[in-house]
Image: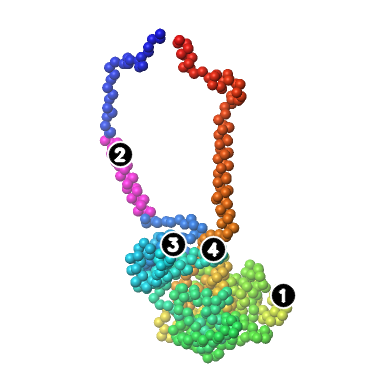
């Protein structure tokens, strides 16, 4: 028999020395650690103070949705008193998150913006207080949610301005669900509205073939009226007769009632927009007296053919234009410079060159962005030698342009226009501005102001509807602000339109069903089968030749003997 071996060999070590306890941490190391911790805490506090004083946000959204424009920044930094913003949107509303992010950007520019988010569903008591204070109308939907007629309230003291959901988002294409965010335009416009203590009155003349301020569309004045209203101007029509608005009315429609009589003395700015009929001397004298007494006027005139298309209509406005030292020529402007003229037409649509003036400061700064006015169908203007002041040119053509005198002869057989003897050579002025001396005894900060534009297209609604014509809208708004001696009108570029939803047809739903129920499970099953087969192939060893007769091979169970079995045989 083999002799038994002990499970563990006895220890041969005698008198093992006791392990020594390490000495304590030195005082210097303790002090160094404490100083490091205190320094880290002080550094953290200093970093937080630095970040708080130099707050910076980054906007990574497409189109810079939360990047504030210069107009908004200047408005916020000029605030001298608190402005309260009540957000009456529920947490489930898609606009809530965007509104909050934008208001965070507002508060980063000023500490005078105070925001209160009141969810009508979760905070009914707070919402009831706001509702009673500002008269908000509310109702419940079928699923129990509370909806209001105001999504946001901007208030200065007891003066509120209400914003609805339609003010915050503009739906461009209902079929494709394209929506354009207008959050910044709405909020900044509301802030400016509550800051203004008065509403300057802008009066449009009627009775001489002018278009109505209610006329919509690309060639109407309704878009301009809407812009003026949103910038806290009061827009009215002067009475005195019904204009030739047949082109704005449907055939057979009942004639419109004449505009109510408005005291011209209450007007801050008088607008004469595209008269197509001669203006009676009585009205001309009335308008001229308004200017001479301290009023301001915007005169948008242009070439008006008579009924026979043989000559231009004499509008009888030479006496009114003479107040500004300007005369309207009887010609038709063609721009021949390919850089300034439109690619369509003969050059009657063109981009004039902008001249320095307080009205055009914004346009000159934005010239590198391609922002410029565009005019269609214009006559040329000329300064009068006997004018009370020298008018300042605002918009001029290139040297290649000319004013065609015999336009009706050319129109009978139109071809590429070329200047002839008697035509007015370029450069031609198509917009002037003049500031007259203050009337005797006037306490106003400036004298009467007049802007004359020789193309009525500057006032058309297309300028506020088409991004390509935005420069013209900026020019008109700046001119009206200068005439009214008011802060510049709010000009915030539109954000790019985004897809606001997903419209699914029956075919689309069937396709989605096939992908989810059939294709995706089938793809997963095929992938799993491929992985299974791949693993089985990797488990076969290189020595496995297969076959039931290979029993003695090195890879068979018979050919693999355990070391334990061999040792037992040797021991026996």
Q: Which residue is mark 2?
A: 32
Q: Which residue is mark 1?
A: 415
Q: Residue at x 35, y 65 (%)?
A: 124
- How far apart marks 1 and 2 lie (CA) works out to 92 Å
Q: Is residue 496 above or below residue 225?
A: above
- Of all residues shown, which one is farthest toward the right? 413
Q: Which residues are magenta?
A: 27-51
Q: Can you see residue 381?
A: no
Q: Are marks 2 and 4 in contact (CB under 8 Å)?
A: no
Closer to the observer: label 1 or label 2? 1
Which secondary structure lies at badge 1?
A: loop
Q: Which residue is mark 3?
A: 93
Which secondary structure lies at badge 3?
A: loop
Q: Nearer the viewer, residue 236 or 347?
A: 236
Residue 92: x and y in percent read: 43, 60
In which quadrant of the rendered view does residue 93 lie? bottom left
Q: Are marks 3 and 2 in contact (CB under 8 Å)?
A: no
Colour scheme shown: rainbow
Q: Which residue is mark 4?
A: 177
* First-in-chain label (4 vs 3): 3
Q: Are marks 1 and 4 in contact (CB under 8 Å)?
A: no
* First-in-chain label (2 vs 4): 2
């Amino acid at each position: 028999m083999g002799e038994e071996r002990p499970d563990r060999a006895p220890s041969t070590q005698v008198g093992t020395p006791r392990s020594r306890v390490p000495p304590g941490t030195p005082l210097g190391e303790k002090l160094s650690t404490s100083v490091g911790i205190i320094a880290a805490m002080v550094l953290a506090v200093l970093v937080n103070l630095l970040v708080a004083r130099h707050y910076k946000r980054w906007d990574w959204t497409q189109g810079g949705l939360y990047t504030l424009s210069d107009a908004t920044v200047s408005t916020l930094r000029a605030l001298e008193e608190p402005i309260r913003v009540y957000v009456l949107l529920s947490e489930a509303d898609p606009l809530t998150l965007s509104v909050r992010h934008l208001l965070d950007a507002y508060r980063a520019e000023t500490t005078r913006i105070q925001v209160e988010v009141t969810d009508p569903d979760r905070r009914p008591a707070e919402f009831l207080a706001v509702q009673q204070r500002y008269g908000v109308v509310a109702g419940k939907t079928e699923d129990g949610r509370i909806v209001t007629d105001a999504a946001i309230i901007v208030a200065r003291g007891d003066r509120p301005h209400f914003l609805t959901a339609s003010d915050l988002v503009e739906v461009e294409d209902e079929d494709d669900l394209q929506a354009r965010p207008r959050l910044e335009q709405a909020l900044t416009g509301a802030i400016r509205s509550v800051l203004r203590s008065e509403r300057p009155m802008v009066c449009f003349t009627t009775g001489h073939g002018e278009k109505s301020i209610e006329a919509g569309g690309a060639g109407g004045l309704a878009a301009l009226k809407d812009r003026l209203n949103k910038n806290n101007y009061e827009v009215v029509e002067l009475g005195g007769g019904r204009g030739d608005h047949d082109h704005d009315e449907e055939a057979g429609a009942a004639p419109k009632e004449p505009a109510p009589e408005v005291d011209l003395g209450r007007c801050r700015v008088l607008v004469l927009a595209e008269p197509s009929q001669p203006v009676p001397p009585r009205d001309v004298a009335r308008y001229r007296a308004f200017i001479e007494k301290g009023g301001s006027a915007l005169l948008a005139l242009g070439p008006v053919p008579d009924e026979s298309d043989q000559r231009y209509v004499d509008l009888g406005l030479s006496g009114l234009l003479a107040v500004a030292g300007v005369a309207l020529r009887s010609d038709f402007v063609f721009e021949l410079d390919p850089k300034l003229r439109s690619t369509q037409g003969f050059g009657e649509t063109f981009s004039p060159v902008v001249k320095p003036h307080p009205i055009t400061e914004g346009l000159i700064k934005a010239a590198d962005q391609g922002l410029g006015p565009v005019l269609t169908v214009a006559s040329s203007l000329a300064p009068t030698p006997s004018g009370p002041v020298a008018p300042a040119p605002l918009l001029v053509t290139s040297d290649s342009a000319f004013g065609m005198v015999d336009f009706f002869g050319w129109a009978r057989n139109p071809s590429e226009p070329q200047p002839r003897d008697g035509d007015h050579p370029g450069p031609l002025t198509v917009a002037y501005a003049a500031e007259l001396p203050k009337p005797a005894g006037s306490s106003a900060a400036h004298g009467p102001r007049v802007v004359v534009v020789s193309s009525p297209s500057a006032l058309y609604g297309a300028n506020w509807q088409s991004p390509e014509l935005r420069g013209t809208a900026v020019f008109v708004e700046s001119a009206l602000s200068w005439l009214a001696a008011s802060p510049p009108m709010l000009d915030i570029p539109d954000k790019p339109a985004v897809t606001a939803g997903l419209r699914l047809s029956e075919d689309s739903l069937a396709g989605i069903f096939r992908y989810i129920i059939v294709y995706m499970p089938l793809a997963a099953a095929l992938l799993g089968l491929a992985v299974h087969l791949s693993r089985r192939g990797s488990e076969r060893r290189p020595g496995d030749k297969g076959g039931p007769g290979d029993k003695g091979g090195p890879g068979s169970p018979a050919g693999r003997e355990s070391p334990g079995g061999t040792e037992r045989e040797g021991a026996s």
